[in-house]
Image: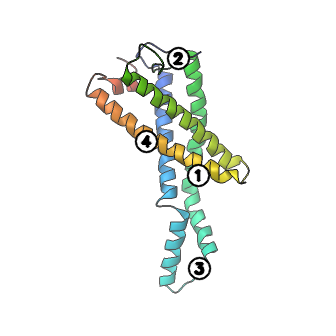
């Protein structure tokens, strides 16, 4: 049974997990954005083909895609690194939850107010989405490339969207809290003190 931590002090380990998870999520989202946006294989191959055509050089679409993959692969490798780090950090976060208690109220608690219940549900959905995105990512990387591959990729992408939305909501919530009743929350997450 998970018990809730009643203190507002954040241990060094908790803060380490928070910030390393934040950096790894940022790296994963940024590399995914690049991979599906500016450094998309199709976009690179069409740009390459068009640029070479201006010089009267023809390149087959297969060759252009192969070159595009070689260009984008080193960048996207960082997406995998972020995923591996996040998998280890999520395991440590769950271990921390079960040994020291969670830092948010139970969404089913009768003592929790509406704001606390909403925050709790968002955290639960965040950790669920993060778990799913990591499991799907590992299945995409190491699992068989069969009919399920496209389903895994779709789930991976949509959970990634939710994580991105959560990060934005988290930052907005912190800003609102700092300007209202939760003054000093950023300071507590940096230095661990009230």
The tag on residue 165 is 4
Position of 17 relative to 159 (above/below): above
Closer to the N terminus: mark 3 or mark 2? Answer: 3
Q: CA distance from mark 1 to mark 2?
A: 34 Å
Label 2 crowd (10 A; few <14 / some 14-19 / many >=20): some
Whether residues under marks 1 and 2 lie with C-beta atoms below 8 angstroms apart, the answer is no
Q: CA distance from mark 3 to mark 2?
A: 59 Å
Image coordinates of residue 185 in percent, x first then y, are 35, 24
Position of 16 relative to 111 (above/below): below
Closer to the N terminus: mark 1 or mark 4? Answer: 1
Closer to the N terminus: mark 1 or mark 2? Answer: 1
Closer to the N terminus: mark 2 or mark 4? Answer: 2
Closer to the N terminus: mark 3 or mark 1? Answer: 3
Q: Nearer the viewer, residue 179 or 74?
A: 179
Q: Secondary structure at mark 4?
A: helix
Mark in front: 1 vs 4: 4
Mark in front: 3 vs 2: 2
Give the labeled residue for mark 3: 59
Give the labeled residue for mark 2: 101
Q: What residue is drawn where x is 39% and y is 40%?
A: 168
Q: Secondary structure at mark 3?
A: loop
Image coordinates of residue 157 in percent, x first then y, are 54, 48
Q: Secondary structure at mark 1?
A: helix
Determine if residue 100 is in view: yes
The tag on residue 100 is none
Q: What residue is drawn where x is 55% and y is 27%?
A: 93
Q: CA distance from mark 3 to mark 1?
A: 26 Å
Give residue 134's quadrant in the image: top right
Q: Secondary structure at mark 2?
A: loop
Give the labeled residue for mark 1: 77
């Amino acid at each position: 049974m998970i018990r809730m931590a009643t203190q507002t002090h954040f241990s060094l380990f908790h803060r380490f997990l928070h910030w390393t998870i934040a950096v790894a999520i940022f790296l994963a989202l940024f590399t995914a954005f690049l991979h599906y946006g500016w450094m998309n294989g199709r976009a690179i191959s069409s740009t390459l083909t068009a640029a070479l055509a201006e010089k009267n050089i023809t390149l087959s679409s297969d060759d252009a895609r192969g070159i595009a993959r070689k260009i984008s692969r080193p960048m996207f490798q960082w997406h995998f690194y972020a995923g591996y780090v996040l998998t280890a950090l999520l395991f440590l976060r769950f271990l921390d939850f079960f040994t020291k208690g969670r830092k948010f109220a139970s969404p089913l608690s009768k003592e929790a107010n509406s704001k606390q219940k909403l925050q709790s549900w968002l955290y639960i959905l965040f950790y669920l989405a993060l778990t799913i995105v990591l499991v799907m990512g590992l299945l995409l990387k190491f699992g068989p490339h069969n009919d399920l591959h496209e389903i895994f990729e779709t789930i991976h992408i949509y959970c990634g969207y939710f994580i991105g939305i959560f990060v934005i909501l988290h930052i907005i919530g912190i800003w609102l809290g700092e300007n209202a009743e939760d003054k000093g929350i950023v300071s507590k997450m940096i230095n661990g003190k009230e």
